[in-house]
């Protein structure tokens, strides 16, 4: 008896779906390195236009923040152009907004919070003006800000505070720059002086990450900062300067290029980014 072969072609469906980075923009504002609306400051985009993939539909954002679906990441590209009031450097960077409608609502160290991300340096311009091989860029921050109450009490016109923590990629190493008091006896309203005569950077090398993906977290609490690279032992700051830190805070993440050299650029990517309080 002859063998009967079913000549029925199996139907296959293309079940591949596009996978994007794991970033919820509900509480992030985006700053770009350009001033296309010519208002004298870098262009910004609020959470309501970024959420649910909304950034993908904004042509002005596309050159600076865009998806790489080959590895489910979000690319941040920047170069020296437009900068904010208190800086000479340009950025493609996210700024945390606890209340998306009010940037003056922030958090204290007593409230605390954790920023976690997986990221990777892609490419960065060479530095031919110093002994470094490449330019450097800041990839994460805790930035200080003067509270509404303290501004009113001190009769201040600016709420600018110093960055408490800056995570800076330098020639493949990840450095933390942490603000510390010049004089630990400083107290009261003198603590609100943002100049280097009161607050200076204390530096520590967290380790080499090169151009490979890495995970990093910053955990802030009353008088304490804990930093962790991958699964390594956390590096902990717990000192008088943190106990006296008078500012409120917000997290930042992205690509903040620390040079004004015209030929400079940097590209890095985030695979995921989360904040908890």
Image (spheres, helix red, strand yellow):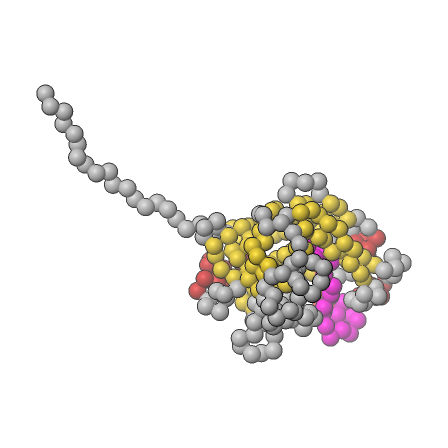
Percent position of residue 102, x then y = 61, 66
The answer to whether residue 56 is left or right of residue 122 is left
Percent position of residue 54, x then y = 46, 62
Is residue 26 in view?
A: no
Which residue is at the far left? 1
**Of residues 71 and 42, which is closer to you in this image?**
71
Is residue 130 in view?
A: yes
The answer to whether residue 150 is left or right of residue 9 is right
Percent position of residue 228, x then y = 68, 45
* Residue at 47% from the left image edge and 54% from the top image edge: 68
* Residue at 68% from the left image edge and 69% from the top image edge: 87
- Relative to 156, is 143 above or below? above
Q: Where does the magenta region start and end?
A: 150-168
* Residue at 57% from the left image edge and 57% from the top image edge: 123
**Of residues 45 and 65, which is closer to you in this image?**
65
Q: Is residue 161 magenta?
A: yes
Image quarter where the N terminus lies is: top left
**Of residues 167 and 247, which is closer to you in this image?**
167
Percent position of residue 219, x then y = 69, 49
- Relative to 89, is 73 above or below? above
* Residue at 80% from the left image edge and 57% from the top image edge: 180
């Amino acid at each position: 008896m002859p063998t009967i072969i079913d000549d029925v072609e199996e139907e296959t469906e293309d079940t591949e779906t596009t996978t994007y980075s794991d970033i919820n923009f509900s509480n992030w504002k985006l700053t770009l390195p350009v001033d296309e609306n010519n208002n004298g400051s870098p262009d910004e985009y609020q959470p309501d236009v970024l959420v649910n993939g909304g950034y993908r539909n904004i042509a002005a954002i596309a050159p600076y923040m865009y998806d790489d679906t080959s590895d489910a990441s979000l690319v941040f590209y920047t170069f020296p152009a437009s900068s904010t009031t208190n800086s000479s450097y340009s950025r493609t960077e996210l700024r945390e907004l606890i209340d998306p409608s009010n940037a003056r609502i922030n958090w204290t160290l007593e409230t605390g919070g954790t920023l976690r991300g997986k990221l990777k340096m892609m490419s960065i311009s060479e530095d031919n003006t110093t002994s470094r091989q490449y330019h450097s860029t800041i990839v994460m921050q805790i930035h200080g800000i003067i509270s509404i109450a303290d501004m009113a009490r001190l009769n201040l016109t600016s709420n600018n505070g110093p960055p408490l923590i800056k995570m800076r990629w330098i020639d493949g190493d990840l450095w933390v720059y942490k603000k510390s008091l010049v004089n630990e006896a400083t107290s009261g309203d003198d603590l609100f002086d943002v100049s280097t005569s009161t607050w200076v950077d204390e530096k520590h090398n967290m380790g080499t990450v090169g151009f490979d993906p890495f995970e990093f977290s910053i955990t802030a609490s009353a008088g304490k900062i804990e930093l962790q690279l991958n699964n390594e032992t956390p590096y902990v700051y717990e000192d008088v300067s943190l106990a006296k830190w008078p500012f409120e805070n917000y997290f930042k993440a992205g690509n903040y290029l620390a040079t004004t050299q015209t030929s400079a650029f940097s590209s890095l990517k985030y695979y995921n980014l989360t904040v908890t309080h």
